[in-house]
């Protein structure tokens, strides 16, 4: 196409872009966009002889169907982590929507509570309470209870696809044991300042309360959350379906953990086969 041929095309595009949306309907041979009710109204329709798609600036619950597709809107639409709303099985949804929770409400003295990509609380920036201060004359005593145990940053705190997880962390030298949900069963101590335990995971959000202990008592609680997903359930809605397949396609050939079901550091046909094998499965 030469420069003379390009000019009318460019002119046509400019004219279409500059059309006021409130002036009249814009149509093609198979569709019509009718914004005649104005930009400030709540409803706009895109229609053809085969379908009508209604959009809304406000919440609505409706379903438009045909033999080839279903359009869900409002209350009928699936929830998912990342939509900005705290849905079932979510503790939070983004750092700006923590449901009113803080580090203090999670058992810490202070700090900044955040939300993981799996919509679970992240307490790594929370600060545990310390011992009391000294008074005049050197007569005041300092609590000898241990400080709260910490979880290593290398331990996934958002989601996993496995049925168990090795959780490891650190503790003070004055702590003689670490309790996981009030139990010391299975907890080992590679060194005087480290601990680890393999925990079993149920599908959904798993919460573990970690406490260090010695003869003087228990430390403040460290809360560790991790979400176990069904293999193939990238959207974390507890079902493997076309929503997950579309996400997997977008992650193809990347190292994104969301689509790396077999944990070989790449999203490929192995992960695709694992998703297909669980198609339609729910938990």
Image (cartoon, rainbow, N blue to C red):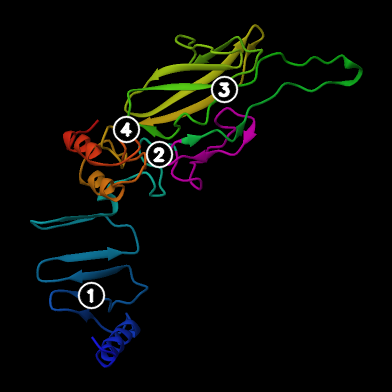
Q: What element carries label 2?
A: loop
User: In this image, 258 relative to 122: left or right?
Assistant: left
Q: Does the stretch in magenta take in 172?
A: no
Alpha-carbon span between mark 3 and mark 4: 26 Å
State the quadrant of the N terminus.
bottom left
Q: Are marks 3 and 4 in contact (CB under 8 Å)?
A: no
- Residue drawn at x 45%, y 29% as measured from the top left: 225
- Residue drawn at x 51%, y 35% as measured from the top left: 122
Q: Are marks 4 and 1 in contact (CB under 8 Å)?
A: no
Q: What element carries label 1?
A: strand
Depth check, mark 3 against mark 4: the one in front is 4
Alpha-carbon span between mark 4 and mark 2: 10 Å
Q: Residue 66 at x, y = what percent?
A: 10, 58
Q: Does the stretch in magenta take in 110?
A: yes
Give the main secondary structure of the magenta stretch.
Answer: loop
Alpha-carbon span between mark 2 and mark 3: 22 Å
* Nearest to the observer: residue 222 or residue 54: 222
Q: Compared with residue 85, is residue 212 higher up or lower down, i.e. above or below?
A: above
- Residue drawn at x 59%, y 39% as measured from the top left: 112
Q: Which label's residue is closer to the chain start, 3 or 1? A: 1
Residue at which label 3 appears:
221
User: In this image, 243 relative to 138: left or right?
Assistant: left
């Amino acid at each position: 196409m030469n420069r003379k041929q390009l000019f009318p095309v460019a002119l046509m595009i400019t004219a279409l872009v500059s059309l006021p949306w409130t002036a009249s309907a814009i149509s093609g041979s198979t569709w019509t966009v009718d914004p005649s009710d104005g930009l400030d109204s709540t409803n706009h329709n895109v229609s053809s002889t085969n379908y009508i798609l209604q959009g809304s600036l406000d919440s609505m619950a409706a379903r438009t169907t045909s033999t080839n597709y279903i359009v869900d809107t409002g209350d009928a639409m699936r929830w998912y982590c990342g939509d900005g709303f705290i849905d079932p099985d979510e503790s939070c949804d983004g750092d700006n929507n923590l449901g009113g929770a803080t580090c203090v409400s999670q058992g810490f003295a202070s700090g900044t509570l955040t939300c993981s990509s799996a919509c679970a609380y992240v307490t790594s920036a929370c600060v545990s309470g310390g011992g009391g201060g000294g008074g005049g004359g050197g007569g005041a005593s300092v609590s000898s209870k241990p400080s709260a145990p910490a979880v290593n940053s290398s331990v996934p705190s958002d989601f996993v696809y496995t049925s168990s997880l090795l959780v490891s962390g650190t503790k003070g030298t004055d702590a003689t044991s670490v309790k996981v949900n009030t139990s010391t069963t299975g907890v080992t101590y590679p060194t005087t300042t480290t601990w680890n335990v393999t925990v079993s995971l149920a599908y959904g959000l798993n919460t573990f309360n970690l406490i260090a202990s010695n003869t003087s008592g228990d430390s403040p609680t460290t809360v560790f959350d991790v979400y176990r997903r069904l293999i193939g359930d990238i959207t974390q809605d507890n079902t493997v379906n076309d929503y997950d397949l579309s996400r997997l396609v977008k992650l193809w050939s990347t190292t994104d953990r969301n689509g790396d079901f077999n944990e070989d550091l790449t999203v490929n046909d192995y992960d695709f086969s694992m998703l297909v094998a669980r198609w339609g499965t729910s938990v």
